[in-house]
Amino acid sequence: MDATGFLVGFFAGLLFMTLAMAAAYSFLKGSRSKRTEIKGYLDLIRDLTERQRSKVQDIRRDFLPRVEAIRQSMQTWRMELAQLLFEEPADRAAIYAVSEKILRHQAELEREVIEHILEEKDLLSPSQKRKFFEIIVEQFSAGGLGVHDIRRGR
C-alpha cells in the first residue's frame, strides 16, 4: 500500500467519524431540548387545542412564580439546617424548629401542585383527562411531585 492510498483512506475514515459524531451530537442535543421544554404535565398531552394551551400558559404565569418562591424558601431553610446540624454543640431545639419550617414549606408546595393539577384538569376533554391521569400516575410512581418536584432540576 502506498502513502497516498493510506492518506486517502485515513482522511475518508476521519471524515466519516466526524460526520457520525456530528449527527449523534445533533440528535442528542435535539432530544435533550425537547425534554427541557416540558414545564408541566399538560406538555405531555399532544392534542391540546390552542385555546387550552393559552389557558395553560395563563395558569402557569401564576403557578410557577408561587412554587419557585416556596422552593427558594425551602432552599434557604435547608442551608440553615445544614449549618445547625454541624454546630458544636448541636442545638436540637433549633434543628427541629428549622426542620418543621421545611416540612411546612413541603406541605405548602404539595398543596400548590394539587390545586394546579385540579385547575389544569378542568380544561381537559374526557379523553385528555384519561391521558392526564396516566401521566400523573407515571410521574408520581417515582415519588415526589413529578415534573414539579424540586429534585428534577426545574
Image (spheres, rainbow, N blue to C red):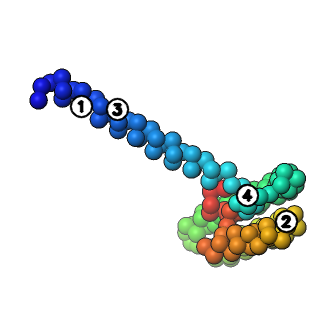
CA distance separating discs 2 and 4: 12 Å
Mark number displayed over residue 20: none
Reading the image, the residue beneath label 3 is 15
* Foreground of the two, 111 or 122: 122
- In the image, which disc is placed on residue 46? 4
Return the x and y of residue 57 as percentages of the image width and height: 83, 52
Q: Nearer the viewer, residue 26 or 93?
A: 26
Q: Image point 83% across, 55% down: which residue?
A: 49
Secondary structure of the residue carrying tag 2 is: loop
Residue located at (29% from left, 35% from top): 13
Q: Residues within 10 Å of mark 1 (few under 14, many from 20)?
A: few
Q: Residue at x 51, y 41 (%)?
A: 26
Q: Earlier in the sequence, mark 2 or mark 4?
A: 4
| Residue at which label 2 appears | 124
Hey, what amino acid is under mark 1? Gly
Q: CA distance from mark 1 to mark 4?
A: 47 Å
Q: CA distance from mark 1 to mark 2?
A: 59 Å
In the rendered view, does 28 fall on the left or right side of 54? left
Secondary structure under the numbered disc 4 in the rendered image: loop
Label 2 is placed on what type of residue? Answer: Leu
